[in-house]
Image (cartoon, helix red, strand yellow):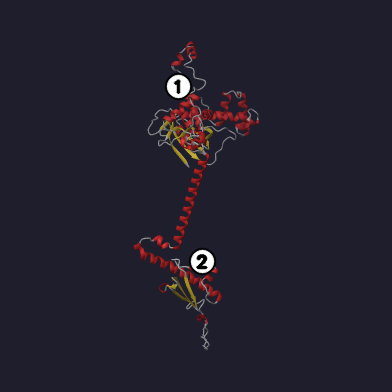
Amino acid sequence: MSVEGSLDLFQLPEILQIIAQQRKTGILTVQGENDIVAVTFLKGDVVGADSLNQTGEEALAALLVEEGLLAPSEVSEALNEVSVSGEQLHSVLVEKRFLDRSQLLSALRMQYLGLLHRVLGWQEGDFKFYANDEVSFEEGLEAIEVQGLLLGAASQESELSMEGSPAEGLSEADFGEFAEDPVLQPPQSPPEDVDLEAVFERVPSARPIRVRSGMPGEEEGDYIFLSPTEQQLLSRIDGRRTIRDLMKDGSLDWQTAVSTAESLEGLALVRRRQFRQPEEELAEEVFEPPPLDDAFLGEGGHHETHGRRAVVFSMDSTLALGSVLLAFVALAWLLGAFASFPGSFLLPFPWQGKERAAFEGQQRAALYLKVDRGAKTFFLLDGQFPERLQSLAGRHLIGVNDLRDPRSRPLRYEPSDIRYELAPVEQGEPIAELAADEAITGDFLLDLDFYSIDDREVEQPLVLLD
């Protein structure tokens, strides 16, 4: 996957921040007017940078001489060894003991930073980012964070802008006057009204956030532009760190940390976190007993409240327990009534009589079918119907609740050799119109007529085989 564009539309600091925030791994190529630079990223951090006009080895050799780490003769000797052996300059410098490993990694990091600071000044050109799962880089190199890179570039730019300022016209005496003025001296410790234990938390913002790069042509638009310091502090605010913690994490003085936090609060990006009162103090306030009046005074003016409080507590507990038991009894009654007369609960109104009768009829038909299957299974096993309906329940062919109809009326069961009758009983008499008569006739598993053999002689059919 690749993303490309022009520096006229997207400024390079914005591109670097997007890669860092999304923790991308890959290579970003930036083509300027006179050079092409490739920046290597590993999970959003810079781990390499190369230029087309100057190879990495040439840039490293120049940096070693410029920083005084090696003499020009030593660099020349190392480069000759590279041309003869074909090895990389990095390996030669360590193997020939020109530098140790830590010195080499520090020099490489300085080389990358110098190239990146130069590229950040480009205002015209094209870029293209190639995402990849793996990239090659020098093992052990301390990765360069994009946030720190932009902060360093902004600091350099501010230092350059200070050159040629009116401060150059001040004499040492003028500076001495400023130094002696206690008002102009920054306080060494925060005043008492500054709370370094304050905690801020993030607030969602509908407007996108960008870091102000200081490049010309930057417009506000619908964005919230932050300084690098504001962006750094905002990224560390998590609702748990105090101002003191943020000062330590970001290496900031208390003035910068407090003013930056207040600036972010003014932009409605953060807010002070309000901590609730400890639970113990709340419990004391809520459960503190009210003052006692004269009605609770006993003989001699002494308070006699312990017995009364015990009685009140006992009464309250009894009422609460009684309410719970009453609720359980009511719930059990409702469940029992629903199980016994579900039609009355589902169709309770008087004009729903036909619907209730139809519903009970469907339930009765399902019950009769269940009893019939259990009775015929019993017949298949024992060769006869059971003498009592309870025998089916004893063998778990039907349930105990199936011994009554949907209106909880008992069922009368009268078996014979090949049939049985089933009917609900009301006031000691079976209800004839609700009775059922079942038999084994026509059941090929139970009816012996299916297995009768004709004794007459029958001519065998003639079968022709081809």
Report x, y in % for residue 91.
62, 33
Can residue 344 be seen here?
yes
Hey, what amino acid is under mark 2? Val
Spot occupied by residue 60 in the image (x, y as percentages of width and height): 57, 29
Q: Which mark is residue 149?
A: none
Q: Secondary structure at mark 2?
A: helix
Contact between labelled residues 1 and 2, with CB atoms less than 8 Å apart: no
Q: Nearer the viewer, mark 2 or mark 1?
A: 2
Q: Is residue 68 left or right of residue 220?
A: right
Judge whether 136 appears above or below 59 on screen: below
Q: Observer-nearest residue: 325 or 59?
A: 325
Comparing 214 with 260, the one in front is 260
Q: Residue at x 53, y 77 (%)?
A: 384
Identify residue type, mark 1.
Answer: Ser
Up the image or down, 430 lies above or below 100; here it is below
Q: Position of residue 430 (x, y in %)?
A: 44, 73
Q: Please say if 48 is above or below 66.
A: below
* x, y percent for residue 88: 60, 33
Residue at the extreme left: 351
For the residue pair 358 and 37, the one nearer the viewer reads as: 358
Q: Residue at x 58, y 26 (%)?
A: 64
Give 344 or 399, whichever is nearer the viewer.
344
Residue found farthest to the top:
173
Q: Is disc 1 surrounded by few (<14), some (14 to 19) or many (20+) residues within 10 Å?
A: few
**Label 1, on which residue?**
161
Outermost residue, front direction?
Answer: 299
Question: Does residue 30 show up?
Answer: no
Tell whether 70 sits left or right of 205: right
Of callouts 2 and 1, which one flags the residue occurring earlier in the amino acid sequence? 1
Circle 2 residue:
400
